Image: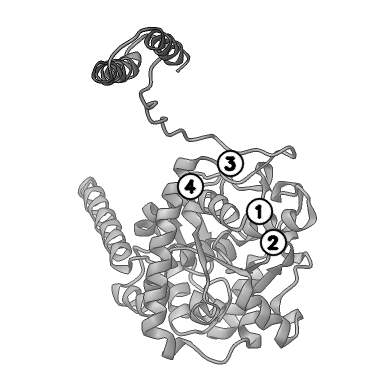
Amino acid sequence: MKILRQKGDQSMTLLSEMTFGPTAKCLALLSMFAWIVAVYFSVGERPGMSWKAPPPRRKTFPVHVNNKNGGHHLDTAGTRHLAQSAQVKRIAIFKVFCGKKAGSLAGEFPSQKYIKQLIVIDKIKTIYCYIPKTGCTTTKFVLYNLQHNANESDVDHELGWIHKQDFRLLKHYSKKEADMRLATYNKLIVVRDPLERLASAWLDKFVHNPHRFSYIRRLQRKTLKKNWTKTTTKRSGSWNRRGSEGITSVVQSPVPFRDFIRSVIDNIYPNAHWEPFFSLCAPCQVKYDFIAHTDTLAADFRLFFHKIGAVVKDSILPRQYPTRGKAGLGNIFREVPTEDIRRIGEIYKPDFDMFGYSFDADHALIEHGRMKALNVSVQQSGDIQV
């Protein structure tokens, strides 16, 4: 622009010093104007003086956004986009289900049956329904650390420590206070494939738990069976707890998995560890606005805290480890009669449908595992010397 101004000033000075008739002056002015316009558009082509619009910036995905205290909102923007897409789909499925089933699953709320499962974290205005065997230990540690500005983990404490901590439940509030929180707070639920959860509950309570015999005795009393037949069940490594070392591939339990499944079908021993989601957390009444899955818990938590504007230290958030629970379904369910598997599917159908899981896909995996085991058995029998 400076060049243009200099050129224009020189041209006007030259014109003022020359004497022309009216027509000649008009022609001279028009010529000068055309020359200035030509110069204006030609300058953009000169090196270092481009008038072209800059190219669009390349989209970048920052690793995380830190603040001075070392907290962050999310791991990566790319991960957040994937988690957000999954979240939109989950919420859509959930709303469609509740829109169709609200009449059969709804009721007066809050009631004592449900609000005992609802943890309230006033600090971040969040209500969380804890469901055993869906990563509730991990979730409780995250919420505890957030609430107390701490950095506790399960490796620092004895088994079950976090469940003994004094979380405030919705039932501790008056009805007016509870209603206000239900209407205005973020509502979080963490869910898991129902059949995976059943397998995990059996392994935890009847096989590996140090207090498993108390569960076994309770079930025995309720079923009036004093002598359960010991069975050996080959255990898939996919069911190992993360970090476990030296666990044998063969486990023995006085309660065979098929008998545990039958007790669930007959509702002989109701327990929160295998009670359906819909009967624990009243989903269509609470109207949860964020649904996390155990197999994507790390990304889901980062998205959740980002959405509610909470800055959380990375050290208290879970890491995502490969999950292979689905691969173990065929192995652990293979001795369960097909009819019992079908009945389990009916019992947990609301959980499957509400949270986007597929019973048919799980059943196909189980049948595949059954056929695979049968083929191995046939091959082994063919190797026997007569």
**Mark 4 against mark 3, which lies toward the viewer?**
4
Three-letter amino acid code at the position of disc 4:
Arg
Q: Secondary structure at mark 1?
A: loop
User: Is the residue under label 3 in contact with that under label 4 (CB below 8 Å)?
Assistant: no
Give the Cα separation between the discs numbered 4 and 2. Answer: 20 Å
Q: Is residue 151 above or below residue 45?
A: below
Instruction: Give the number of the disc on residue 124.
Output: 2
Binning the other alpha carbons within 10 Å of mark 1 as few (below 14), some (14 to 19) or many (20 upward) gives some
Q: Which residue is mark 1?
A: 310
Give the Cα separation between the discs numbered 2 and 1. Answer: 7 Å
Q: Which residue is mark 3?
A: 245
- Applied colour scheme: one colour
The reply, left or right, for residue 131 in relation to residue 162 is left
Instruction: Give the number of the disc on residue 80.
Output: 4
Mark 2 or mark 1: whose residue is earlier in sequence: 2
Three-letter amino acid code at the position of disc 3:
Glu
Give the Cα separation between the discs numbered 4 and 1. Answer: 15 Å
Q: Residue at x 68, y 70 (%)?
A: 119
The reply, left or right, for residue 183 in relation to residue 278 is right
Instruction: Give the number of the disc on residue 81.
Output: none
The reply, left or right, for residue 185 in relation to residue 20 is right
Mark 3 or mark 2: whose residue is earlier in sequence: 2
